[in-house]
Image (tube, rainbow, N blue to C red):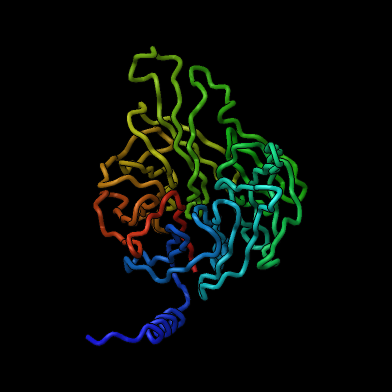
């Protein structure tokens, strides 16, 4: 077969990408090394578009406003957020955090307002002196997404350290931030309006929980959830009951938190998602796919997986489970039977690393 000359091949490829139809229905977003955002059609089990992001990698957190038009991705070694128009693939927003004198990292916690007008980033700054580094207080920076490619914070307000997830709530003036506890902030005044204790809960017989909350997958059921592991101090230290696994669920519309233990801690679970079609059901993933009733605390189903997956999401009708993050594919499972229904390979076998996997509806 005769090959096109390189220049003609590149032109043909660009034209093909430009002629892709505008997005419709429900799509998955994921990222891969070194610095790419992928739009995935889960119904067709195919990648619709791959977009190269500016900066020095490695992409991670993804946040999208309600209209699903622009994806904001934390990248450039956690020192920038770039906004990408999902229909054209063009970069329409960029906020660089650091300067030569000051290194600023955003560790996963990025959120956009539902109307898409404001972007919130939890930031950890360090002053870079000639002979010493000076650690500064952490805060949440607020960006105006209309500021385009050279965006700077319009305002900031103090926030605790160790924030790893944020989400806009049903109140347009509120965001919830998850760290050692959950913190409800007023984004207009910067006031911390309420703290929902997690590490500092006062539950007789239950110790301080261990939480690895790095993956935001709350858009389908409007519920931010995370697995946790906790000591059951009422049990003997050598008892199988001595450590429990549970799930914390924050309802973004009612702004209420529920926690529930559901089994002895026998397996690791990294991320979770709530079923929008049956809100008492949660699905959790790492080396197994797990289904739990968050009301009764009953373990409903578990299946060993062929590899480790970090991130999980779910279809809008609650019928399909998507698992990704880590390595080079997204696998799709039936939410009832746990039968594997398909998979989508990342281009070139690229690694999703610790990237998020989000659903957009258009």
Decide if residue 193 is in sight here: no
Q: Is residue 68 or residue 32 the one in the foreground?
A: 32
Q: Looking at the image, is 351 positioned above or below residue 67? A: above
Q: Is residue 53 or residue 47 the one in the foreground?
A: 53
For the point 48% across and 63% down, the residue is 360
Q: Position of residue 168 (x, y in %)?
A: 61, 51
Q: Is residue 317 or residue 185 the one in the foreground?
A: 185
Q: Position of residue 318 (x, y in %)?
A: 38, 54
Q: Is residue 200 left or right of residue 306?
A: right
Q: Is residue 316 left or right of residue 340?
A: right
Q: Residue furthest front?
A: 131
Q: Looking at the image, is 220 positioned above or below residue 40? A: above
Decide if residue 272 is in sight here: yes
Q: Position of residue 197 (x, y in %)?
A: 60, 30
Q: Looking at the image, is 150 positioned above or below residue 215? A: below
Q: Position of residue 188 (x, y in %)?
A: 75, 51
Q: Quadrant of residue 193?
A: top right
Q: Residue furthest top?
A: 236
Q: Looking at the image, is 114 positioned above or below residue 125? A: below
**Quarter that holds the N terminus:** bottom left
Q: Is residue 12 or residue 158 the one in the foreground?
A: 12
For the point 37% across and 39% down, the residue is 292
Labels in figure, total: 0
Q: Is residue 161 left or right of residue 344?
A: right
For the point 55% across and 56% down, the residue is 76
For the point 31% across and 55% down, the residue is 331
């Amino acid at each position: 077969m005769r090959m096109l000359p390189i220049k003609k091949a590149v032109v043909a490829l660009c034209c093909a990408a430009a002629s892709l139809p505008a997005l419709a229905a429900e799509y998955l977003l994921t990222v891969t090394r070194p610095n790419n955002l992928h739009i995935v059609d889960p119904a067709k089990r195919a990648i619709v578009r791959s977009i190269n992001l500016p900066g020095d990698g490695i992409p991670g957190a993804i946040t999208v406003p309600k209209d699903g038009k622009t994806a904001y991705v934390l990248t450039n070694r956690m020192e920038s957020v770039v906004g990408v128009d999902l229909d054209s693939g063009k970069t329409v927003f960029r906020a660089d955090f650091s300067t030569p004198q000051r290194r600023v990292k955003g560790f996963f916690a990025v959120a956009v307002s539902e109307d898409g007008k404001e972007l919130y980033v939890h930031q950890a700054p360090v002053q870079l002196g000639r002979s010493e580094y000076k650690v500064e207080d952490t805060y949440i920076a607020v960006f105006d997404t209309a500021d385009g490619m050279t965006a700077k914070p319009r305002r900031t307000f103090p926030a605790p350290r160790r924030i790893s997830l944020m989400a806009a709530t049903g109140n347009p003036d509120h965001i919830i931030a998850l760290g050692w506890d959950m913190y409800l902030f007023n984004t207009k005044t910067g006031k911390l309006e309420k703290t929902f204790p997690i590490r500092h809960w006062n539950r007789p017989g239950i110790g301080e929980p261990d939480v690895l909350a790095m993956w935001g997958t709350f858009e389908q059921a409007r519920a931010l959830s995370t697995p946790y592991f906790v000591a059951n101090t009422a049990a003997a230290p050598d008892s199988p009951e001595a450590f429990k696994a549970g799930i914390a669920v924050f309802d973004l519309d009612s702004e209420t938190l529920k926690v529930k233990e559901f089994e002895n801690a026998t397996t690791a679970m990294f991320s979770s998602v709530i079923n929008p079609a049956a809100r008492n059901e949660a699905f959790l993933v790492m080396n197994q796919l797990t289904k739990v009733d968050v009301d009764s605390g009953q373990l409903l189903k578990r299946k060993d997986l062929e590899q480790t997956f970090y991130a999980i999401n779910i279809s809008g009708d609650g019928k399909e489970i998507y698992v990704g993050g880590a390595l080079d594919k997204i696998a799709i499972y039936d939410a009832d039977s746990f039968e594997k229904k398909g998979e989508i390979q990342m281009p070139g076998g690229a690694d999703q690393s610790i990237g998020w996997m989000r659903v957009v509806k258009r």
